[in-house]
Amino acid sequence: MAGDAVVTVRLVRSFQHRNFKPVVFHQVDLDQTVQDFIQLVRDDITTRAGLPPPFKKHSYGTYTNELVMSLDDDEKLILQNGQTLRAAGVTNETEVAFFKKEDYGLYKANPKSAW
């Protein structure tokens, strides 16, 4: 049913430092488009209590169903604008990563972690 899904969004601030924060969204409509959900998340995180300012101000924009961040199969894993969440494979209790595409590209070119 529309609006009944729970989706956890991992806000990825840094791939290299493995800096991320999970945020849970309730009553998600899986029939909304990926870009509508991106906008919903962007609007929500700017005012969400308890979320540190660096996570609120980061310029996210890309989703993937792959949480471990496989560096292969981008075409399959990165959610495409124009798709509904359901068509992209998002279901109830799915976890997705939300990140800046440029950061991902830099990490993919040199996938080394810094501790």
Image (tube, rainbow, N blue to C red):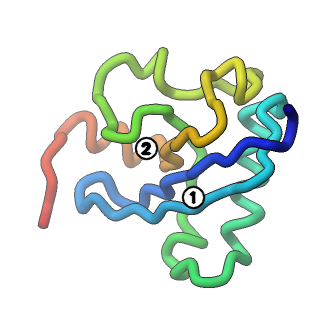
Q: Residues within 10 Å of mark 2 (few under 14, many from 20)?
A: few
Q: CA distance from mark 2 to mark 1?
A: 10 Å
The image position of residue 4, as x and y in percent, is 80, 43
Mark 2 — residue?
102
Q: Amino acid at mark 1?
A: Ser
Residue 36 shown left or right of residue 11 in the figure: right
Residue 111 shown left or right of residue 58 in the figure: left
Q: Secondary structure at mark 1?
A: loop
Mark 1 — residue?
59
The residue positioned 40% from the left and 62% from the top of the image is: 20
Q: Secondary structure at mark 2?
A: helix
* N-term-proximal mark, 2 vs 1: 1
Quadrant position of residue 36:
top right
The image position of residue 84, as x and y in percent, is 76, 25
Q: How many marks?
A: 2
Q: In the picture, which quadrant includes the C terminus?
A: bottom left
